[in-house]
Image (cartoon, rainbow, N blue to C red):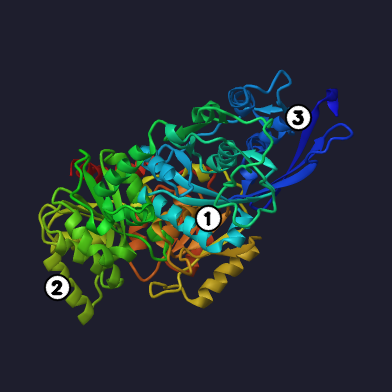
């Protein structure tokens, strides 16, 4: 026991997505308090890219109350500089009666951590499914916060239905704001814990992984200021006590001399780690004011908040809400936002929303899920006003080859004839048979408004559209090509990734594909296979996580071989060498026209061209996407959208 003071000594370990902190109390003989433990936190991603100093934050945050209670310091191998200096300010405010021998951090290394944060999605918000949570989501809508649950493994195991309801609430809420939902589970929480500090600390590594600049902790209003220390939390949670993250109430017969914080929730705002801040939300508003604010929010965008309305017990549910409240902000409805299993289409949807946020920052964007369009149509007809902008996704389904997707767009065009409408870059294909001719005849009756903005992503489609359809016709690349993804540059690469179609657009034969694999093996590449299509659909709120998993596969490969358009595009925007085979659609060849100055992506028509193209892309040293040049191709379309 150094210098006669107790020390909680901590040792970290990473196992896949788990962050484990083993701790041991170094104390004098006769000490009868907790002696050791293991705190395990399960994150949605591997935390191996997170700096060690940032990974120390959850251990310190979860153990601080234990250290204060037993008069101990906390020792870690390395600590983030900002957290090292900000925690004492929090400690002094939270525990003003601690005395002179205050608990502090001991570490041989203080680490300065900085990274470039996401400019669009700025926050991770602790989600409990309470009024405070929903209000905080609404209050911080401008930051587009991710919703993050923190629940014990015991809670998930013993209260499956309640855990599932909490997860569904978070997914719905994240979907409302067009961001993502995450669940973090844990076990081994110490005997006493400062619950808001623990929540903020656990979220700091996730915020780093997601390049966020804020961790938001919803707190009760002034009439319901809560104490922060909760007793009896350990790895054996007693059934019936915990309803979410660290929710056990203090025992009535608890000792009166225990050290408890008696502070304003704003104390958490003293904390920072890396270049990330912890902020609180909701403490300035009473519970009644929060309820009224939420009612106003539900009235304004009632369709997308139906689940929240039901959950909060409001009488003005989505289907019966009163008239829309005027907010002064124009609205854009993204009609048929992707929910099926093709992640290439999900990438189009995500890129469309990002483009709109940049070009039209004034817009309030509401995504109408494709899977819910017909169920919501009646409510949409009473919600959408003639001034609302309707946005339709780009892709490769203008025509009858993927008729079910095109039919939804046509139905919306026929239903809202008087609204301003924008269709993002599409490819056209009508088959040369009776079905194709019938589909084209119907399309001629649908796309007949001179004011519609219709964009097409290849010259064949563009010329066809100018000849057959009315409207303002534009030629522009696939919207996914608008932005590079520099955050995926420079990753450690290995192996060859095969991303090949298995549907009706496939052209390369099985024998030719096998020869491609053999040639790659002869070059010394280990072969991995991936598919841009999932085994089942993906909800809007789960989109970002699945896209990140897919894009990482590309960015961590030495070379990609694909016959998918978005296989080529993802390779281009992540700086990954790629050989692209044509398929039974002109869209890939058309897309490659836009990428003629991307030397590490090459298009081939058959197997005979593969070996030469492979050598060519592997020889390129500057693997940087020419974003500025490609964005120039969007200039006319961008100006039209900006003015619409």
CB-based contact (under 8 Å), mark 1 and mark 3: no
Q: Residue 557: image x %, image y %?
A: 57, 54
On the image, numbered disc 1 is attached to which residue?
549
The x and y percentages for residue 308 are 36, 53
Instruction: Give the residue at the far top of this rendering.
Output: 100
Image mark count? 3
Q: CA distance from mark 2 to mark 1?
A: 41 Å
Q: Nearer the viewer, mark 1 or mark 3?
A: 3
Q: Residue furthest front?
A: 253
Q: Nearer the viewer, residue 259 or 128?
A: 259
| Figure quadrant of the C terminus | top left
Q: Earlier in the sequence, mark 1 or mark 3?
A: 3
Residue at (25%, 43%) from the top-left corner?
A: 638
Dot 3: what SS?
strand
Residue 634 visible in this rendered orientation of the protein: no
Label located before the other in sequence (2 or 1):
2
Q: Which mark is residue 470?
A: none
Task: Kindly identify which residue carries mark 3.
Answer: 72
Q: Is residue 354 visible?
A: yes
SS for callout 1: helix
Residue at screen point 33% across, 48% down = 353
Q: CA distance from mark 1 to mark 3?
A: 41 Å
* Residue position marked by numbered label 2 in the rendering: 441
Task: Mark 2 vs mark 1: give the one in front.
Answer: 1
* Residue 459 on image: x %, y %: 26, 58
């Amino acid at each position: 026991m150094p210098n006669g003071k107790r020390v909680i000594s901590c040792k970290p370990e990473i196992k896949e997505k788990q962050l484990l902190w083993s701790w041991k109390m170094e104390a004098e003989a006769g000490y009868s308090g907790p002696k050791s433990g293991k705190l395990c936190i399960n994150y949605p991603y591997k935390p191996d890219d997170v700096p060690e100093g940032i990974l120390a934050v959850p251990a310190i945050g979860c153990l601080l109350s234990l250290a204060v209670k037993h008069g101990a310091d906390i020792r870690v191998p390395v600590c983030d500089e900002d957290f090292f200096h900000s925690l004492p300010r929090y400690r002094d405010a939270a525990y003003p009666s601690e005395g002179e021998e205050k608990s502090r951090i001991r570490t041989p290394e203080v680490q300065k951590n900085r990274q470039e944060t996401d400019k669009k999605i700025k926050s991770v918000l602790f989600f409990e499914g309470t009024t405070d949570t929903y209000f905080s989501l609404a209050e911080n809508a401008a930051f587009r916060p991710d919703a993050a649950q923190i629940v014990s493994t015991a809670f998930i195991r013993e209260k499956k239905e309640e855990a599932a309801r909490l997860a569904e609430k978070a997914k719905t809420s994240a979907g409302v704001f067009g961001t993502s939902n995450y669940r973090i589970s844990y076990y081994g929480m110490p005997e006493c814990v400062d619950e808001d500090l623990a929540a903020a600390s656990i979220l700091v590594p996730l915020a780093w992984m997601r390049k966020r600049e804020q961790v938001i902790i919803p707190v009760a209003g002034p009439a319901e200021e809560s104490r922060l220390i909760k007793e009896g939390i350990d790895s054996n949670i007693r059934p019936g006590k915990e309803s979410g993250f660290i929710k056990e109430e203090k025992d009535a017969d608890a000792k009166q001399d225990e050290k408890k914080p008696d502070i304003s929730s704003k104390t958490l705002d003293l904390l920072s780690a890396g270049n990330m801040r912890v902020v609180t939300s909701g403490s300035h508003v009473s519970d009644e004011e929060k309820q009224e604010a939420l009612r106003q929010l539900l009235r304004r965008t009632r369709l997308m908040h139906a689940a929240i309305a039901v959950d909060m017990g409001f009488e003005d549910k989505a289907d019966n809400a009163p008239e829309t409240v005027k907010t002064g902000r124009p609205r854009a409805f993204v009609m048929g936002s992707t929910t099926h299993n093709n992640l290439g289409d999900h990438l189009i949807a995500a890129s469309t929303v990002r483009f709109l946020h940049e070009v039209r920052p004034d817009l309030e964007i509401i995504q109408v899920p494709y899977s819910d369009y017909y169920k919501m149509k009646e409510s949409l007809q009473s919600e959408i006003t003639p001034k609302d902008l309707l946005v339709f996704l780009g892709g490769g389904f203008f025509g009858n080859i993927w008729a079910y997707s095109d039919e939804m767009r046509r139905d919306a065009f026929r239903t809202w004839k008087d609204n301003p409408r924008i269709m993002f870059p599409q490819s056209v294909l009508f088959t040369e048979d009776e079905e194709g001719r019938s589909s084209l005849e119907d399309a001629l009756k649908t796309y007949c408004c001179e004011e519609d903005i219709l964009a097409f992503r290849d010259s064949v489609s563009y010329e066809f559209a100018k000849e057959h359809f009315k409207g303002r016709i534009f030629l522009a690349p696939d919207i996914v090509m608008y932005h590079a993804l520099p955050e995926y540059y420079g990753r450690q690469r290995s192996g060859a990734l095969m991303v090949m179609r298995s549907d009706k657009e496939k052209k390369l034969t099985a024998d030719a594909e096998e020869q491609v694999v053999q040639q790659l093996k002869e070059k010394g590449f280990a072969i991995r296979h991936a598919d841009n299509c999932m085994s089942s659909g993906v909800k809007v709120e789960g989109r970002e996580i699945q896209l990140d998993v897919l894009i990482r596969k590309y960015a961590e490969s030495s070379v990609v071989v694909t016959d998918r358009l978005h296989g080529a595009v993802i390779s281009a925007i992540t700086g990954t060498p790629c050989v692209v085979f044509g398929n039974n659609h002109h869209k890939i060849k058309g897309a490659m026209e836009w990428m003629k100055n991307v030397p590490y992506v090459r298009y081939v028509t058959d197997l005979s061209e593969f070996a030469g193209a492979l050598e060519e892309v592997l020889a390129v040293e500057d693997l940087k996407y020419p974003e500025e040049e490609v964005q120039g191709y969007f200039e006319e379309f961008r100006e039209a959208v900006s003015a619409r």
